[in-house]
Amino acid sequence: MADDQQVPHTLFVFFDFFLFFYITSFSFVRKLLVQRKSCARVLTLNRPKQLNALSFYMVSRLLEIFTEDEENSDIKLVVVKGNGRAFCAGGDVAAVARDASKSDWRFGANFFRTEYKLNYLMATYSKPQVSILNGIVMGGGAGASIHGRFRVATENTVFAMPETALGLFPDVGASYFLSRLPGFFGEYVGLTGARLDGAEMLACGLATHFIPSSKLSLLEEALCKVETSDPNALSAIINKYSEQSFLKGDSVYHRMDVINKCFSRKSIEEILSSLEMEAMSKADPWISATIQTLKRASPTSLKIFLRLIREGRLLGVGPCLVCEYRIVCHTLKGHYSKDFFEGCRAILIDKDRNPKWEPSKLELLSDSYVDRYFSKLDDEEWEDLELPKRFNNLPTYAIAKL
């Protein structure tokens, strides 16, 4: 009799576990919506409450899908978009920082390794990727879109690489794509975390097209009828829905003369000094705000990224990502500076917006200090970033990035 009484309890326990596993797994999978529409693969980032921040599952699944679809001759193009008011606000760095600080830093390294492999595959993909940037595009969101062949901005687009305020650095291949912007605009965008709208993205080349959000459903419908991977044919379709965009009167893009003059300097100290000289010669709130933004950022992050973008100008996207991976592993290990963890605490967790950087001043960071971040890790279990093998018959725009 006692044994009979135990059976229902065991079944209930099993049922509760099964129900929990089913619900959490279903929620887990739905972070990324995967659809096949005729010859198009449509991928929707689906964490609207988290502004579609990329989790490890999402970058892993995206890498898997892109890899599989490249071998599938029935898939001619890939459309990537976000659900809600963001395309993607970046990688889930708060989770990465939490896991790295509480357990093994290698868990965080695994996230970035997978993300960078995805960035490389997107940058050198044999089929056109059309990224619909209708909302916030920051950090990892840029890595999941800017590398693709077509980037569609709208009146709702807000782009930024805000990593230096977090004690990190603009990564996901930013040392490649920001270094290709006109003049020294990439230095300005990466060092300050400045926000750009859709018109500014189009003007500097981060976006390839500008389309009003009211036409996006029509664009997607037209793209899903395409039966070719010919970028010229796709460009012609996107052009049908494109409209001319206009820079606002106070757009930062009108300040390219000052940006080129100041952000072309050899060091962060010289950039700041040049900006301060400009501020003395004319009363300009933008210059003052730019100076304060740089002074609030992590000194370590600033020096790392300036060297990174300067080296990135002469490298292909693959070597850029390999270099970024070495730096991010040193950052996660925290043996030189713990600015990344402090930045996440101050900006994302406690939100007091008052990080205590260490080293705290630019003059405390020597060239040899920065050099260490660019070296391979002295760790027997660590391996350099190994990128996916690419084909010889890639389209011209992909080959140019190698």
Image (cartoon, rainbow, N blue to C red):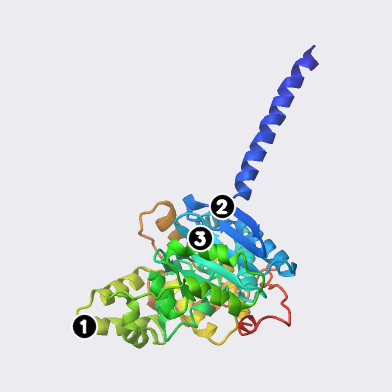
254 and 98: which is toward the camera: 254
Secondary structure of the residue carrying numbered label 2? helix
Q: CA distance from mark 3 to mark 2?
A: 44 Å
- Judge left or right: residue 32 versus residue 366: right
Residue at horizontal 57 percent and vertical 57 percent from the top: 44
Q: CA distance from mark 1 to mark 3?
A: 50 Å
**Closer to the N terminus: mark 1 or mark 2?**
2
Residue at horizontal 69 percent and vertical 62 percent from the top: 64
Q: Which residue is mark 3?
A: 217
In this rendering, which labeled residue sits more in front, label 1 or label 2?
1
Q: Which residue is mark 1?
A: 280
In this rendering, which labeled residue sits more in front, label 3 or label 2?
3
**Closer to the N terminus: mark 3 or mark 2?**
2
Q: Which residue is mark 2?
A: 102
Residue at horizontal 68 percent and vertical 68 percent from the top: 382
195 and 149: which is toward the camera: 149
For badge 3, the amino acid type reads Ser
